[in-house]
Image: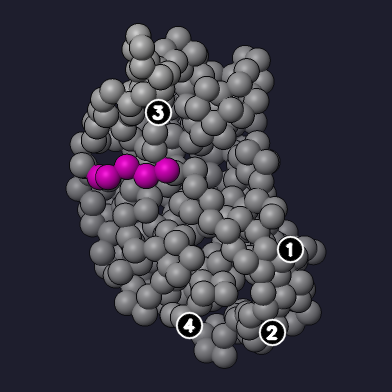
Amino acid sequence: MKCNKCKFDNTDNAKFCIKCGSPIQAIAKEPSLIKKGINNKYIKWVGTSGVALGMLIAIWWAYDSYGYLLINRKAKVYVEGGTFQMGSKKGDNNVKPIHQVTLKSFYISKYEVCNADYAAFLNNQNASEEQVEKWIDIADDDCQIEKVGGEYQAKKGKAYYPVIYVTWYGAVAYAKSVGGRLPTEAEWEYAARGGQKSKGYKYSGSNAIDDVAWYRDNSQNTNNDMYDGKGTHIIGTKQANELGIYDMSGNVKEWCEDEWHANYKGAPTDGSAWLGSFYRVLRGGSWNSNTRSHCHSVYRYRNSPDSSIDIYGFRVVFED
């Protein structure tokens, strides 16, 4: 069934578009109402007698309870290929040695995948409960997606927070469903550091961590108290990096395609995924990172692919 908003061809029984997250049936019944951006923002186009179809008659704004301006959460950023020095002379041994990597151009999600979009993905998969359990820990009380009346949905007020409690398997499955994949570790670091527009910042977009990242020292959130008054924040509410990408130094750590290696000796130099292990790589800081160095663009972490906790999320890469 084709989505009226983004024109993506979904399966016949799809209730939500896996590309843009819009409820397909609702749009089909009310073609004059087009969901735009995130939260409760809509633009209503009405054709009237004698006036060209599609003429804008009224614009209706309905902000969420936080009053945030609304964004296109499905936006992709073009990352022009190039050569960069991956890793660092400072820090843990796992970021050494510095090595030259040359990558092809690609697209990457402007924002981390949010609860609303992941819930839409689950609704379209017709997956067994066993399969869903492999992807995301819905059973955990702190998971921000729930199943109500046979359908998955973001919990109240949590639609546009980054999805959490998602496993590496769940991140891979979502990425494939929208025609993408997880970023390789090299692609992730290259994009975080600003690609060809890099200004050499310590964090993704600034040398001042508070400008670009939600981490333990600033992640207080009375609307999302996950631990000690702190938690994730709505995607895209900090400053973007040089390429216009948000939240690569904080909010949630992000799964990558690569398998873990203890250092960069023998690492690929073409930007491809480095395989040959069991643990998977996570990059970036999180809302609960208590050390600023864990938010650096070069910082690396790992866990088993079935691990799902409240600091793990992801974004998607698309081939050029």
In the picture, residue 121 is in which quadrant?
top right
**Disc marking residue 35:** 3
Residue drawn at the location 23% of the way across and 51% of the way down: 221
Task: Choose the circle earlier in sequence order: 4 or 2.
Answer: 2
- What is the distance, in whole Å, between disc 3 and disc 2 at their CAs? 45 Å
**Disc marking residue 83:** none
Relative placement, left or right, of 217 versus 174 is left
Residue drawn at the location 51% of the way across and 85% of the way down: 91
Q: Amino acid at mark 2?
A: His
Task: Choose the circle earlier in sequence order: 1 or 3.
Answer: 3
Kindly report the secondary structure that dominates the magenta region of the rendered protein. Answer: loop
Name the secondary structure under disc 2.
strand
Task: Choose the circle earlier in sequence order: 2 or 1.
Answer: 2
CB of mark 4 within 8 Å of CB of mark 3?
A: no
**Disc marking residue 273:** 1
Q: Which residues are magenta?
A: 68-72
